[in-house]
């Protein structure tokens, strides 16, 4: 096992350390504050001692991104200085920081340990964000001791399952007929949202709903000579991005989506008066086909 640390993963670890946050290598966690029993404990270099009792954990950890970046002393990076833990009788309470449910760490303290390395970039807005405020911790979504997924150390192979564990209602929406890309794995929750915090609404990766949608649907951006005001304001006025049983992920069937705003017009536009409108596949869009906006000089009614 020592050769695994010093040989096989040495070059990978060295390369990874070059891009790893320097504050992590220095460490900035007050371990005594997290566990008063660690007062006076000192660091024990290497992970050889950990192997004596935790061989399965150490071997699995060595195959993860953390294990490759910090092969030596990786245990103490998250669990604190180990001298007292190693000297304590086997049956005594664990003199180390533990993330297990029976541990004494608060949600904020758990996150602080992770943030000593992972602060900044996509986690800049973690503090004060909805997940942090609601005491969601890093280990609620990520598992660091073994490789359970190919990306981001999520608790499940499919990254969106980490989100859907709590957001159960979204799982049902995703299974509806009109949002195939999520079910097919073409996009996931992180394509639109940043669970670690955001300056935009609903933890979006961008400042507005429309900016997020335009990342894939650029043809809807415009600018248009004739704009459709609700579209310009918010794509979510008409569409449910998490899934729908209606064509185009409309919130309600067409033409009823149009009639939610356009109740009066130059012609009878209630379905019972207008046979064209009763075609629920297109409805009003049979004529007003450019619903997102038109660049035609005669497109003021979005008909061309």
Image (cartoon, rainbow, N blue to C red):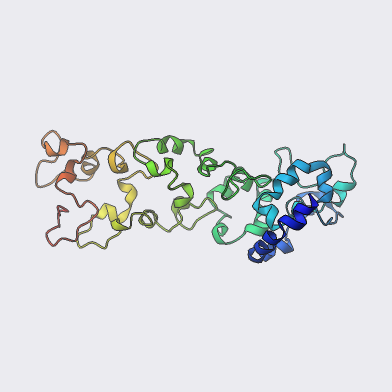
Left or right placement of residue 237 versus residue 228 in this view = right
Q: Identify which residue is drawn at 59% across, 61% down.
A: 120
Seen in the picture, residue 19 relative to 303 is either above or below; the reply is below
Nearer to me, 127 or 274: 274
At which x and y percent is residue 11?
Answer: 69, 61
Left or right placement of residue 216 versus residue 202 in this view = left
The image quarter in which residue 273 lies = top left
Nearer to me, 141 or 111: 141
Left or right placement of residue 248 versus residue 169 in this view = left
At which x and y percent is residue 180?
Answer: 38, 41
| Count of all numbered marks drawn on residues in the image | 0
At which x and y percent is residue 56?
Answer: 75, 41
The image quarter in which residue 255 lies = top left
Seen in the picture, residue 256 relative to 45 is either above or below; the reply is above
| Residue 72 appears in the rendering | no
| Residue 4 appears in the rendering | yes
Nearer to me, 2 or 250: 2
Nearer to me, 286 or 58: 58
Quadrant including the C terminus: bottom left
């Amino acid at each position: 096992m020592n050769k695994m640390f010093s040989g096989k993963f040495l070059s990978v670890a060295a390369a990874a350390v070059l891009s790893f946050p320097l504050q992590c290598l220095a460490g900035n966690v007050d371990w005594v504050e997290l566990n008063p029993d660690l007062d006076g404990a000192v660091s024990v270099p290497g992970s050889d001692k950990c192997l004596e009792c935790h061989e399965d954990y150490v071997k699995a950890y060595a195959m993860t991104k953390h294990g490759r970046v910090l092969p030596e002393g990786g245990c103490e990076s998250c669990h604190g200085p180990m001298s007292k833990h190693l000297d304590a009788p086997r049956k005594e309470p664990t003199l180390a920081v533990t993330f297990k449910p029976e541990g004494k760490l608060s949600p904020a303290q758990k996150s602080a340990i992770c943030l000593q390395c992972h602060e900044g970039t996509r986690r800049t807005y973690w503090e004060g964000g909805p997940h942090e405020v609601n005491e969601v911790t890093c280990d609620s979504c990520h598992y660091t001791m073994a490789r359970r997924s190919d990306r981001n150390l999520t608790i499940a192979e499919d990254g969106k399952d980490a989100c859907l564990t709590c957001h159960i209602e979204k799982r049902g929406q995703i299974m509806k007929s009109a949002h195939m890309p999520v079910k097919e794995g073409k996009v996931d929750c992180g394509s639109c949202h940043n669970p670690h915090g955001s300056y935009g609404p609903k933890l979006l990766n961008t400042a507005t709903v429309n900016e997020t949608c335009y990342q894939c649907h650029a043809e809807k951006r415009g600018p248009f000579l004739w704009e459709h005001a609700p579209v310009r304001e918010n794509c979510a006025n008409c569409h449910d991005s998490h899934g729908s049983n209606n064509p185009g992920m409309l919130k309600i069937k067409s033409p009823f989506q149009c009639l939610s705003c356009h109740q009066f017009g130059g012609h009878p536009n209630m379905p019972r008066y207008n046979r064209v409108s009763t075609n629920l596949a297109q409805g009003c869009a049979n004529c007003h086909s450019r619903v997102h906006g038109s660049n035609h000089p005669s497109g003021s009614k979005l008909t061309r």
